[in-house]
Image: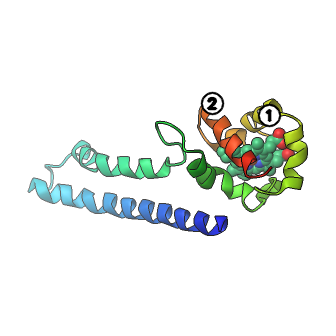
Amino acid sequence: MADQQDHSSKSIMYWSIAIAIVLMVALVPLSKLGKGTAGGASAEDADARIAPVAKVALQVASAAAPAGPVDPKATYNGVCAACHASGAAGAPKTGDKAAWAPRIAAGKDTLYKNAIGGKGAMPPKGGSSLSDDDFKKVVDYLVGLSK
Ligand code: HEC
């Protein structure tokens, strides 16, 4: 189940990015046509015209670090599941109680510290750009699924 969700949310993300890129490419010549004369549209004009689209593309790409209150489940699915759902790179699998028990036994502070600073193949904060407090909520969510 978790795998399926992960695949579908990923493919939605990839499609959104692909569509945004196509739109960006399509809008550049359109903005030149709109000006009437070939030399009329400066690069800055084109930049200004594609800015909203570029912004959407950026928002899609940074969905892993949404503004506002963190959604631990969405962040887990978007960032952590890449390794923790499958056990990729030697990550302790989500829900694998035996793999998590000794880590949980080391105490929350140790878990937080290792996960924030990075440990073994795990990059600091799992590669996310969350604040420490938000990241801890995602750790709690992941650990909660694995007790
Ligand atoms: C690139 C793969 C990868 C991603 C992405 C990743 N992890 Fe990990 N994580 C690992 C690996 C590998 C370990 C085991 C490290 C070790 O013990 O050597 C680990 C271990 C952990 C641990 C246990 C630390 C300890 O004290 O043993 C926690 C907690 C954790 N990850 C949380 C997260 C959270 C939360 C996210 C998402 C925000 C995340 N990870 C994303 C690979 C990843």
Name the one closer to the observer, 138 or 122: 138
Identify the residue position indicated by label 2 in the image. 133
Q: Residue 135, image x and y in percent?
A: 64, 37
Visible residue check, residue 101: yes
Q: Amino acid at mark 2?
A: Asp
* Left or right, residue 51 beside residue 76: left
Gap between marks 1 and 2 measured at Cα: 13 Å
Q: Residue 59, image x and y in percent?
A: 43, 47
The quadrant where residue 1 appears? bottom right
Identify the residue position indicated by label 1 in the image. 108
Q: Residue 88, image x and y in percent?
A: 77, 59
* Left or right, residue 101 beside residue 129: right
| Secondary structure state at the residue bearing disc 2 | helix
Mark closest to the chain's N terminus, 1 or 2: 1
| Picture mark count | 2
Name the one closer to the observer, 72 or 117: 72
Q: Amino acid at mark 1?
A: Lys
